[in-house]
Amino acid sequence: MVVRHPYLDNTSPIAFAHRGGTSAAPENTLRAFDDAVTLGYRYVETDVHSTRDGRLVAFHDNDLQRTCGKPWRIEETDWSTLSTARIDGTDPIPLLEDLLTSWPNLRINIDCKSDAAMQPLIDTIRRTHCLDRICVGSFSDKRLRHIRSELGTGLCTSMGPQEVIRLVLGSTTGIPFSPSRHALIAQVPVRQGPIPVVTHRSIARAHRLGLQIHVWTIDDPLQIGQLLDMGVDGVMSDDTRALKDVFVARHLW
């Protein structure tokens, strides 16, 4: 594969600590990310939402019910209040900037979860000068188009949902497809409902287009090995120790 961005300077498949991993600490906490870095991870994945007053938090859900036992919606809550919540009763919610400044060499995959998070994300990226070590993704093609237009050619992104659909369909139909110049990666599940997404054909077509394939979220060591055998370029896992063990056994760590 041709390296087209500093974020993708890895010469072997990439092991991602999904939400920092959940092996030793609650998801999306500084303790989880620190554990991943201590294990030797160079890549982590996180998500971002914006508080009512524009602070960008590294957090997956749009509310705090599941992780903190509070019904607060992030977009409707100020940071001064949100910062008092504790994930699993123990850990504060971090800001994205906390991750960027705590580990200045760590590569971070960032899923922009809401329209409200777009401008705070753009502002944070500009303020921290981190374009070389981030990749931005989203389940919204509209969000991705806006972020790409604001941050320019130095930004690495994954493909949006519509681009992924065209990639997967084209791998069986042969319909021509040209991804956005910013889209260097397809970050996908193994399946979407009954439809296989990660197949030998879709991987081959992505590689012909100069794209990498990263798969989420895989915790089973056997399945991790199967995906690596198929030729995927990255695997995201909550089980950071299981993922590392497979990579070490295959001399990929």
Image (cartoon, rainbow, N blue to C red):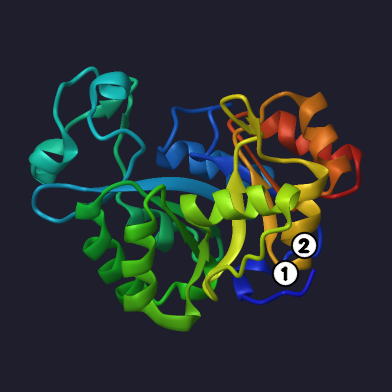
Q: Amino acid at mark 2?
A: His
Which quadrant would residue 84 be assigned to in this image? top left
The x, y position of residue 192, in whole percent, is: 57, 32
Viewed as shown, does residue 109 lie left or right of 17?
Answer: left
Residue at the spot x=47%, y=55% of the render?
A: 160
Residue at far bottom of view: 153
Q: Which mark is residue 73?
A: none
Residue sitting nearer the eye, 4 or 79: 4
Tell me: 91 left or right of 242: left
Expressed as whole percent of the image width and height from the top left, the position of residue 119 reads 22, 65
Q: Is 59 positioned to the left or the right of 189 in the image? A: left
Q: Tag on residue 210?
A: 1
Counting from the top left corner in percent of width and height, residue 165 is at 56, 49
Residue visible at 71% across and 40% down in the picture = 198
Q: Nearer the viewer, residue 213 or 248?
A: 213
Foreground of the two, 110 or 179 = 179
Answer whether residue 28 is visible to the viewer in this image.
Answer: yes
Q: Residue at x 44, y 27 (%)?
A: 26
Q: Is residue 13 visible?
A: no
Three-letter amino acid code at the position of disc 1: Gly
Q: Is residue 122 left or right of residue 39?
A: left
Residue at 8% across, 39% down? 76
Check disc 2 and report the residue beneath it.
207
SS type, badge 1:
loop
Classify 10 Å Cα crowding around label 1: few (below 14), some (14-19), many (20 and above).
Answer: some
Q: CA distance from mark 1 to mark 2?
A: 5 Å
